[in-house]
Image (tube, coloured by chain):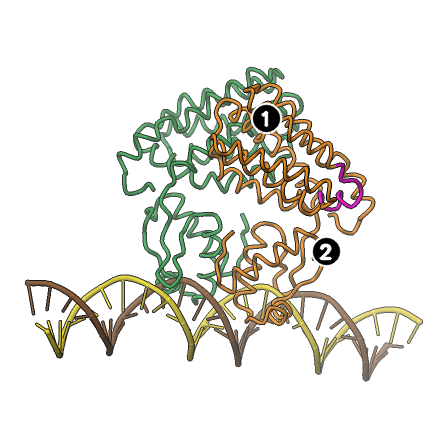
Chain colours: A green, B orange, C brown, D yellow
Amino acid sequence: MHSAASAGSIVYNRLKQQIVSLELSPGTLLSEKEVSLTFEVSRTPVRESFVRLAQEGLVLVLPQRGTRVSLIDSELVEEARFMREQLEKAVIRLACEHFQDDKLAVLENNVSMQLESMQQQDGKRMFDLDEEFHRILFEGVRKQGTWNVIQQMNAHLNRSRILWLSTDPHWDVLCKQHQDMVHAIRNHDADLAEQLMKEHLSLSISNLAVLTKQYPDYFK
Amino acid sequence: MHSAASAGSIVYNRLKQQIVSLELSPGTLLSEKEVSLTFEVSRTPVRESFVRLAQEGLVLVLPQRGTRVSLIDSELVEEARFMREQLEKAVIRLACEHFQDDKLAVLENNVSMQLESMQQQDGKRMFDLDEEFHRILFEGVRKQGTWNVIQQMNAHLNRSRILWLSTDPHWDVLCKQHQDMVHAIRNHDADLAEQLMKEHLSLSISNLAVLTKQYPDYFK
DNA sequence: ACTGCCATACTTGTATGGTAGTATGGTGCA
DNA sequence: TGCACCATACTACCATACAAGTATGGCAGT
């Protein structure tokens, strides 16, 4: 994204990716020095990335004590779902009224790629395509800034989604819903589209309670 | 807020306040060195604050060239209004269903203080009380995380609201709407409450076009 | 065995010097 | 006059040294 070649941005992007993908477990102790050694840069850019991650709530800095990957906050996850539901319902309604023509093709292309990935059992790719599907929706109604802000909460939501992935992806249902939503947009059926979106998102993390019991030390 | 006593946080909070209040005009050139001199700290904590402000889009860092207070992005302002409308409509509906008892009293107290401030023509205080009114709403339905995320977009929205203040505050209408919303919550009238909120927020920045013409070099 | 103290090895926070890239104004040349 | 060039004075970026707070383990005294 901010493909910035600066050392600070590189460290930030890499750490963020590792945290959101759970490559770095919630609760893991970091340290400016340790990270600076693994990335072979000085503490300054590392510290810079910590500041940014802390602002997004992905790490917790305890002055003079240490820095650790933040635990998943169940309340934040639920709020993220709530927030996405409200905004995406509104966005897909807008999309039914008016949607950038070229983006509609992109959306359909995305869905067809989802079908491919599903047949290939490529969960990671499905996850990314799912994210992109929703991003395209926001772009198509010129609400990219809104999508960017959502990403902040999404970082928390996604960590729990990835945990859930390991239990039961059921991509088939999600993919079908994506298809139906595209049809609804094409037919300008706002009420149907909104209903589909609502169901789609509620499906995303219905059983948070299960995860908190299965991975107790990942959650706050 | 983050009452953190660290130099970095102090600089960050102060700069943010100055930017959002337009004490620092959009487009103003900053510089690590200059700011470090005025705050009498080294460049490190200043740089830290720049990173945080840049992430919120309040400043624009041009590598090796300089850092400037970002111009007000009309699209972001409109998106912020859109985002608030969707989320606050949903939130006030929730509030009509169930609202923390003690918070309702706080809300009414807030409104009465608004009446005071209006009589005293204290625009600044009204602005702050208005912000607090909405924050309390989110807190009352346990959506504080959502409110915090909104704040990021709000920083942009508020700059244009402050510009608008200088032209026509018409606090009387806004204050009346606040009162009506509290009544609607008390009467559990979700439909009315949502309608009131929608009108309330659309009133907040109806005439962005006027501002862009009146202050052309403040906008992107 | 237990308690209190302190040396030590961490942590993040801050200051500062050096590096590389960029804008600018002046100078020499055509 | 106008254009190319270059010295200079900025900028953000990074590395490093030092300061200050915190946890910990061992040791001495009871």
Q: Which residue is drawn at 62% across and 27% down?
A: B181
Q: Quadrant of residue B42?
A: bottom right
| For residue B2, above or below residue B102 | below
| For residue A42, above or below residue A82 | below
Q: Nearer the viewer, residue A27 or B41?
A: B41
Q: Residue B173 carries which label?
A: none
Tally of numbered tags: 2
Q: Nearer the viewer, residue A122 or B105?
A: B105
Query: In the shown orientation, is residue B213 left or right of residue B12?
Result: right
Could you tell me the amino acid type at mark 1? Ala
Q: Which of B39 and B115 is in front in this view?
A: B115
Task: Report the residue marked by disc 1.
Answer: A90
Quadrant housing the C terminus of chain A:
top left
Q: Residue B25 carries which label?
A: 2
The percent position of residue B100, horizontal first and vertical second, equals 47, 30
Q: Is residue B167 magenta?
A: yes
| For residue A23, above or below residue A42 | above
Query: In the shown orientation, is residue A93 left or right of residue B103?
Result: right
Could you tell me the amino acid type at mark 2? Ser
Marks 1 and 2 on same chain: no
The percent position of residue A210, horizontal first and vertical second, equals 30, 30
Q: Residue at x 62, y 25 (%)?
A: A95
Q: Which of A145 and B21 is in front in this view?
A: B21
Front of the two marks 1 and 2: 2
Residue interval drawn in magenta? B161-170
The percent position of residue C26, horizontal first and vertical second, equals 81, 80
Query: In the shown orientation, is residue B31 left or right of residue B97?
Result: right
- The chain that hosts pointer 1 is A
- Disc 2 crowd rating (10 Å Cα; few below 14, some 14-19, many 20+) is some
Q: Is residue A163 magenta?
A: no
